[in-house]
Amino acid sequence: MTQTEEQDFQPVVGREKRLADARALVEAIENEDSAGEAQLIGELTAAYSGNIFDEVGRMTREVHDTLKSFAEDERLGALAEDEMPDARDRLRYVITLTEQAATRTLTITEEATPTAEQIVDRSQRLKGELAKVAASEADNARLGGVVDSMTRYLDSTTNCAERLKGQLTEIMMAQEFQDLSGQLLMRVIDLLEQLEEKLVGLLQITAPVRGAKGEDGRSAPVERAEDGVGPQLPNAGDNVVKNQDDVDDLLASLGF
Amino acid sequence: MDRNMKILVVDDFSTMRRIIKNLLKELGFTNIEEADDGQTALPLLKQGNFDFLVTDWNMPGMTGIDLLRAVRADANLASLPVLMVTAEAKREQIVLAAQEGVNGYIVKPFNGATLKEKIDKIFERVES
């Protein structure tokens, strides 16, 4: 038997009395005195259960005190009624800000891409025209030299503009973060809403005077894959694909 | 593959619709329309002679998987090629989408090369 168990069964009645009761119990059984037997068993059990009642009483007081201090804690009321809705608004604002930033970036990349395309087109056209001039003035060595260096310049301009187009596409793709972070934030907002509802409910039970907000007793929505469960975090389990290759492998295994 | 084909891009995030639209433009597709969830997409699909549907999964109103089901259940749309581009990455979801008759599945974050590859593959199959 462990230390705690011994403590839990510490009888409240003295050793002498218990021994006397036990001996009397043996005697009652021997004499087939069933009334006396029942009474003695009751007394012996009471020697232990007195402790249990004390313990239940103590726990009840503790629960009562805790609930009382919970109800009296202004901080919890403020948390449920002001700070949590405030936190949700802040998160919504983060979504708005990232959306604005992403939209701004997309507008600029959309404007810049045709500019880069124009540079490529014009450079190539100019290069062609210069080649024609050089061909018609083939005996002019000085002109040939100038056309050569201009052609080299136009080729490098074309390369730069092509690279720029690729980089603009990368910048555009990076804005994808707004969709993913937005979806994740909306889930946190949802969670805050549920927590807030529960906290308000609890505060109402402990202190009914706090007002009657959110009493529809609506249960927390259950996540269903059907409805979509949003982006998964990088350390999610095996039931989540890690990248496009995983998706392709899974679909291939289904005969795709 | 016909570069003039009519494409509907469905996503509740305007940022993502714009990205997909730009990528499609880079691939030479110009006839692109947008919708922000299944509910607005379905009537467009029913009226509009679309050749290709690119849809997200998780959207308010009507989800992408329900849109896919509605498309497959409609006699006029049943054979419309559907590509899902979504952050939904659970295996059971990909299996479900396949069972409901999706033609391709891309998980976000993704890139232009993946989009091109999946579109090429879908139309290779459709045309063969």
Image: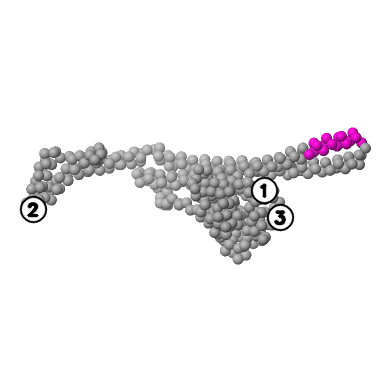
Q: How is the image coloured?
A: one colour
- Marks 2/1: CA–CA distance: 97 Å
Residue A36: % across, % down: 9, 50
Q: CA distance from mark 3 to mark 1?
A: 14 Å
* Identity, as a three-letter code, of the amino acid under mark 1: Asn
Q: Nearer the viewer, residue A198 or B82?
A: B82
The residue that label 1 is drawn on is: B22
Mark found first going from the N terminus, 3 or 1: 3
Q: Chain of mark 1?
A: B
Local SS, label 2: loop
- Whether residues under marks 2 and 1 lie with C-beta atoms below 8 angstroms apart, the answer is no
Q: Is residue B26 visible?
A: yes
Magenta stretch contains residue A151: yes
Image quadrant in which you'd find residue B64: bottom right
Q: Position of residue A245 (x, y in %)?
A: 58, 48
Amino acid type of the residue tagged 3 in the rendering: Arg
Residue at image location 35% in from the left, 41% down from the top: A71
Q: Which residue is mark 2?
A: A32
Chain for disc number 2 = A
Mark 3: few/some/many CA within 10 Å (<14, 14-19, 20+): few
Residue at position x 23%, y 38% in the image:
A7
Look at the image and say whether residue A231 sits in the magenta stretch: no
- Residue bearing the label numbered 3: B3
Mark 2 to mark 3 CA distance (whole Å):
103 Å
Q: Amino acid at mark 2?
A: Glu
User: Which portion, as a residue range, is magenta?
Assistant: A140-155
Viewer-nearest residue: B42 or A82: B42
At 12% across and 49% down in the image, what residue appears?
A: A39
Q: Which quarter of the image is occupied by the N terminus of chain B? A: bottom right
Tell me the SS state at disc 3. Answer: loop
Query: How many numbered discs sit on the rendered protein?
Result: 3
Q: Does residue B125 appear to the left or right of A45 in the view shown?
A: right
